[in-house]
Amino acid sequence: MKLKILYSFLKADIELIEKELENAIQSHSPLLNGASLHLIQAGGKRIRPVFVLLAAKFGQYDIERIKDVAVALELIHMASLVHDDVIDDAELRRGKPTIKAQWNNKVAMYTGDYIFARSLEYITNIEDAQAHQILSSTMVELSIGEIVQIKDKYRYEQNLREYLRRIKRKTALLIAASCQLGAIAAGAEEEVHRKLYQFGYYVGMAFQITDDILDFTATEKELGKPAGDDLRQGNITLPVLYAMENKALRSKIIKVTEHSTKNEMEEIIRLIKSTDAIERSHILSKKYLVKALNILEELPVNRAKKSLKDVATFIGKRKY
Amino acid sequence: MKLKILYSFLKADIELIEKELENAIQSHSPLLNGASLHLIQAGGKRIRPVFVLLAAKFGQYDIERIKDVAVALELIHMASLVHDDVIDDAELRRGKPTIKAQWNNKVAMYTGDYIFARSLEYITNIEDAQAHQILSSTMVELSIGEIVQIKDKYRYEQNLREYLRRIKRKTALLIAASCQLGAIAAGAEEEVHRKLYQFGYYVGMAFQITDDILDFTATEKELGKPAGDDLRQGNITLPVLYAMENKALRSKIIKVTEHSTKNEMEEIIRLIKSTDAIERSHILSKKYLVKALNILEELPVNRAKKSLKDVATFIGKRKY
């Protein structure tokens, strides 16, 4: 099943945002245009805009007012991906060469800066002061998260709490902000937008854990990059943390470097999958999902609520 | 003479901003704190905050309202320096190792991102919508400027117009915005803050041209980095453009690479100084300065006006 079906009634608005994203990155610099367009065309699930729109249905839904929030949040997300690819020395994203691979690290750094700056132009259009506060503090946390991620690489003695704090900054906070800001931009009541924030936070946590599981369970074709790539880059994710409880496996895992061969990685992946690490990761992901769905229950009934529920459930089950 | 003397009546407020800058970059990440503090302590002229404060004197000067603007602008400037040092492979800035040299490119990229994000928190406190528009479009131009600077490196067939557009984005726009935003934050009239923007723009152009001259005329000790470093990094500045009008010298200049030795650079610098390139650069810088001073004449008389005039004149004559 495709994610899109879950919010097909938003099709026209999602397409509008897709167009707006393309407009947003236009500049007179061919180099910048090339790099940014490359990124936009690589696609992505656009789940942040989707959450913005769905959350806005809990207020006075007016696409003209909401679209700037949706575009800004997707641009922030995209900018952070470009910089992440530099840190992770990632060659591929969604099956396409990354900007740092197709051009170089410097072009990637500045393309990220540019997309980030463009997002500010959209944020400028948002009138609500609270929205600005949420966005700026989210961006500070996001950037602290980036630094912590460098520090935590190949650091095998880290614990579950550190992992959870990292994925909170990396993913959950921006999805939480997407839900809350969509609601705020639509003038939803405080109680409602606060709950949507919580919902987004839990969904974001589940989403990232699922992502981290897929790095081991999905195929290279599904991932658009080699399986086990996170581990090879030294990113200690939840399945790895669980797998390392097995001392023998731990001693193999800590030998992984970015120079590990495909065969070596396949063997490590096989070993990790032979433990209960994947299963236990699924259980934690599901725990977050249940928390998200429980909060959703407290919100008024509307068409968007059903979609939010479906999207959240999809995220827990997705295979790519 | 020291620049500080020209605005000694702002001493207490400048110190307040210096403290606020130190607070602004605090985080729980020791790595991030180390890198950011390193940058703050490397100092700098803080001319953007100075322009914010002086411009605010043309309205209702209230340091509590203005300081956020001053801090935000200095943080944006600092963030862009960190990223510039990555692009320029700069080892030293103001006599100290750069963040990319002391740590690495990745830490520098994220430290820049972090400082940039922190600036947004300060910007959030600014209520004026016009101020947000000016800031966000300045940041877009700044980031386009960064990309163009990569593209223009070692591109010897560029012309004066391209150089001027580049320094506009690199320096003049942010100084123009500093002047305008200080005035806007103090509730100055539109006519006044528009003139201050123009003043800042011309001063900024003169400032950058002077900077580019100093790369050839100042000593390594004064610069805090080797003389001719801009040229070695492929940055074609105004003195270089003028010097290249001499065919024989041009053929030598285009052979400069980042691997050129100290002796080779000294010889090139000597040759460039033997032409009229430095003198002609001074003339263009002075032209911008005169434009700045003329605009100042149109503004109401106050203590700040005298300081702005002195600072502008200082910039044209400075030796470091």
Image (spheres, coloured by chain):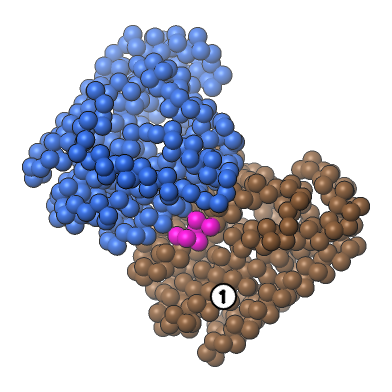
Chain colours: A brown, B blue
Q: Residues within 10 Å of mark 1 (few under 14, many from 20)?
A: many
Q: Is residue A168 magenta?
A: no
The residue most toward the front is: B12
Q: Secondary structure at mark 1?
A: helix
Q: Chain of mark 1?
A: A
x and y percent of residue A265 in the render? 84, 50
Would residue B147 be visible to someone looking at this image?
Answer: no
In the picture, measured across the screen, residue A231 lies left or right of residue A64, that is right
**Measured along the vertical axis of the image, is residue B131 above or below residue B212?**
below
Q: Which residue is mark 1?
A: A198
Q: Residue at x 54, y 40 (%)?
A: B34
x and y percent of residue A129 in the render? 36, 68
x and y percent of residue B281 in the render? 28, 22
Location of residue B178 by image quarter? top left
Which image quarter is the C terminus of chain B in? Answer: top left
Which image quarter is the N terminus of chain B in? Answer: top left
In the picture, measured across the screen, residue A186 lies left or right of residue A305, that is left
Q: Which residues are magenta?
A: A136-141
Would residue A67 be visible to someone looking at this image?
Answer: yes
**Measured along the vertical axis of the image, is residue A253 above or below residue A204?**
above
In the picture, measured across the screen, residue B12 lies left or right of residue B40, that is left
x and y percent of residue B219 in the render? 39, 15
- Dominant SS of magenta comes to helix
**Measured along the vertical axis of the image, is residue B100 above or below residue A200?**
above
Q: Nearer the viewer, residue B294 or A190?
A: A190
